[in-house]
Amino acid sequence: MPIVVFNQKGGVGKSTITCNLAAISASQGLSTLVIDLDPQGNSTSYLLGAPAAEGQPTVADFFEHTLSYSFKSKPPTDFVVETPFENLDLMPSSPALSELQVKLESRQKIYKLREALQKLADSYDRIYIDTAPALNFYTRAALIGASGCLIPFDCDSFSRQALYTLLDNVAEIRADHNPELQVEGIVVNQFQPRANLPQRMVAELIAEGLPVLQPYLPSSVRIRESHELSKPMIYLDPSHKITLALIELHDGLRA
């Protein structure tokens, strides 16, 4: 089941949530793939310790390949690299994604990622897709190809305003392109339980009937350390409170 992690607002923890959920899947023995569609490449750096090396295949190479028709098309697995973690592979990001976008749109390649995901499902038990903070060609392609969408949310008024627009956009893509797409839920990130604003805001979202997931992910400097060390929490500190919360979140998602 491909899951896309998406929010049009930046700084809400998309890459952190993507990589940590994927690492938990891998640690549980599931063959897992992360696809990094954000040109900034945060998930790529998190899992590899650096941007994709020169000559290494990337997701931009995959999209470039879709622009040149061939009877002997490369399988999408040709654009995947191994990470240092067992059972966890990556289709790395590349800055070239930004340059390719206009060409892909003009050639109407929006469904090529969905086709690739259907083929990749034969090789992987779990696929997680990280996205840029924008509703662009790549995020639309991901939502068209995925069956689930996770929405990271940090507790401020700007995130809340963006949330309603995001839900409308997901509903439109479901209606027009992908009836299987489901909002898995809203992941409350960097939650501070002793502060009034986060408690009130989450309570209001729940009262509105929005699918807020439990548990809420606490704020922790340990996450920043895991970024610096390029080591997801399940490998860095498996008994930390945020690791345990991520495991509970992971295990509560649809199989």
Image (cartoon, grey):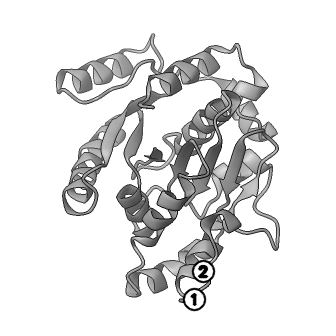
Looking at the picture, tell me which residue is in the foreground, 52 or 226.
Answer: 52
Give the residue drawn at x 35%, y 60%. 144
Most extreme residue toward the top, as rendered?
A: 194
Give the residue drawn at x 33%, y 26%. 212
Which residue is denoted by mark 1 in the rendering? 70
The residue carrying pointer 2 sits among few (fewer than 14), some (14 to 19) or many (20 or more) residues within 10 Å by Cα, namely few
How many dots with numbers?
2
Instruction: Report x, y in % for residue 162.
Output: 31, 47
Give the residue drawn at x 53%, y 61%. 119
Mark seen at residue 233:
none
Q: Amino acid at mark 1?
A: Ser
Which residue is denoted by mark 2 in the rendering? 73
Q: Amino acid at mark 2?
A: Ser
Instruction: Report x, y in % for residue 99.
Output: 56, 80
> Is 143 located above or below residue 212 in the figure?
below
Instruction: Report x, y in % for residue 106.
Output: 39, 87
Locate residue 185: give its quadrant. top left
The residue carrying pointer 1 sits among few (fewer than 14), some (14 to 19) or many (20 or more) residues within 10 Å by Cα, namely few
Compared across the picture, whether 151 is left or right of 17 comes to left
Looking at the picture, tell me which residue is in the foreground, 207 or 129.
Answer: 129
**Marks 1 and 2, Cα distance to the nearest angstrom?**
5 Å
Numbered disc 2: secondary structure: loop
Give the residue drawn at x 27%, y 18%. 203
Compared across the picture, whether 4 is left or right of 200 comes to right
Compared across the picture, whether 176 is left or right of 77 comes to left
> Is 193 located above or below residue 206 in the figure?
above
Locate residue 87: give its quadrant. top right
Numbered disc 1: secondary structure: loop
> Is 155 located above or below residue 92 in the figure?
above
Instruction: Report x, y in % for residue 62.
Output: 60, 73
Q: For the residues labelled 1 and 2, say whether their Cβ atoms are less than 8 Å apart.
A: yes
